[in-house]
Amino acid sequence: MSITAEIRVGDKTLPLPVIVGSEQEVGVDIQALRDKTGAVTFDPGYGNTGACESAVTFLDGELGILRYRGYPIEQLAGKVSFLEVAWLLLKGELPNAAELATFTAAEKANRGLPAHVTAIINAFPKDAHPMAVLSAAVLSLSSTYHAETAATHAGLNFNELRLMAQLPTIAAAIYRHGAGLAPVAPDAKLDYTANFLNMMFAGTARSGHDADIANALDLLLILHADHEQNCSTSTVRLVGSAQADLYASIAAGITALWGPLHGGANQAVIEMLDGIVAHGGDVGWAVAQAKDKDSSFRLMGFGHRVYKNFDPRATLIKVQADVVLGKLGKNDPQLAIAKGLEEAALKDEYFVARKLYPNVDFYSGIIYRALGFPYGMFTVLFALGRLPGWMAHWNEHNAGKAKIGRPRQIYTGKNARDVVELSKR
Ligand SMILES: CC(C)(COP(=O)(O)OP(=O)(O)OC[C@H]1O[C@@H](n2cnc3c(N)ncnc32)[C@H](O)[C@@H]1OP(=O)(O)O)[C@@H](O)C(=O)NCCC(=O)NCCS
């Protein structure tokens, strides 16, 4: 059955083309609307706006489905590595053995930072938020690499390869600078995630994470690797649509991710759990606060613009929280509080009616804390995971007939008026 659409604005009726995606999602194409009727659509928060066509990730919020390039997240998690997922997102297919070997070797060979990036990280005050430093450090890479955007290396654009290889080095250098520790050089004997853990914690009381822990962190990176047109990805696409370079676009994505309603929620969750501990572990207190319309308190790590059933990433991360804490022999009272909070909220009419479920950030912070990451680094870990997704979207946008992103508005300000001289105001 073919679907038709039309819109009537005043006395003008306009038939509108309908586009249907590969998973049968229907989009009404309103590109001619303003030209033909003078009207624009009004959709604050873009909840009903398809800003692009995309072949990267499919998400069904009602059914709790998340697929990268067609592969269900449940199959990718645990079966492939984060580097394989990065390749999948960037290239469209999982790598074969030769491609993966070349990519792995090239990632190892490009981990070192230019001196100016280290200098910029070290110029920040030690108590600067790591996300601020991360964004600045990534932006600073553009000065070195801008001219090389067209080059390919190991099957990838050289800039993409180096961002993949250098973001963990940057992240670890930020942590160690803040902690007053000397940086640790990348170790080419170690794979991506094990090397990152080593650069973070070598020589500290938290060193010595084994392969199981590295695999668990790798899995978390996979679960964060893409999520279609979220706030930071849309930011990357929008900044890129002005033909800003990859580094400038990713730096902008990092700052968008930092916000507590987006990736910053993983830090906000653990701070909320600390608050509940301070209230004697009373989850009822938190639920009551979240429901109180006079309070700005929200259950952090709960709710999602798109998921209205369950977040499949949260389901997988909850299992990992038990696995990792069990492996580390840690009995974190916050895990029990988080589970109690989830149970209480899921039974509460307020959360049921609004379809609010735990999201990707609800349990991840508990794992990061158990591994020894300070709170300020949690969203940096999200950024490490999200990097390949951001780059895949940046590429997709710029490969198409990319238009500069430029929303319209409904102006509600003053009508035209004359400027009055200063002496008469
Ligand atoms: C993710 C989030 C920003 C989505 O927001 P959204 O789609 O714009 O939904 P809204 O903010 O319009 O919320 C819809 C309703 O649910 C309520 N709500 C949403 N999330 C809530 C939460 N975490 N705690 C309490 N109430 C919440 C809102 O108050 C609103 O109630 P109302 O209809 O009575 O006014 C929102 O759920 C949130 O702030 N969650 C906490 C932060 C978080 O975990 N972010 C990470 C997302 S992966």
Image (cartoon, rainbow, N blue to C red):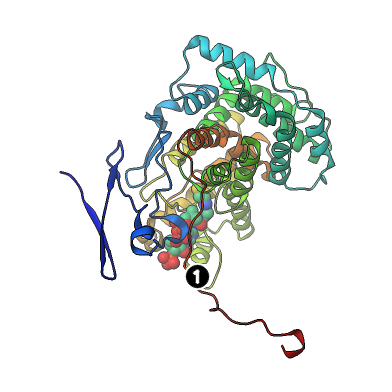
List x then y, in percent, for residue 392.
51, 32
User: Who is closer to the viewer here, 79 or 281?
Assistant: 79
Instruction: Note whether residue 322 is visible.
Output: no
Q: Residues within 10 Å of mark 1 (few under 14, many from 20)?
A: few
Q: Secondary structure at mark 1?
A: loop
Where is residue 75, by image quadrant?
top left
Q: Residue at x 24, y 57 (%)?
A: 6
Q: Quadrant of the N terminus?
A: top left
List x then y, in percent, for residue 161.
62, 24
Return the residue found at the far top. 98
Q: Residue at x 41, y 37 (%)?
A: 54
Q: Which residue is mark 1?
A: 411
Q: Quadrant of the C terminus?
A: bottom right
User: Who is closer to the viewer here, 17 or 390?
Assistant: 17
List x then y, in percent, for residue 355.
37, 55
- Indicate whether 347 appears above or below 379: below
Instruction: Report the amino acid beneath label 1.
Output: Tyr
Where is residue 366, by image quadrant?
top right
Return the residue found at the far bottom. 424
Q: Mark 1 CB in 8 Å range of ligand 1?
A: no
Indicate left or right for 7 with 222 as reference. left
List x then y, in percent, for residue 258.
62, 48
- Indicate whether 117 appears above or below 354: above
Total marks placed: 1
Instruction: Note whether residue 180 is visible.
Output: yes
User: Who is closer to the viewer here, 34 or 99?
Assistant: 34
- Indicate whether 2 appears above or below 316: below
Where is residue 182, by image quadrant?
top right
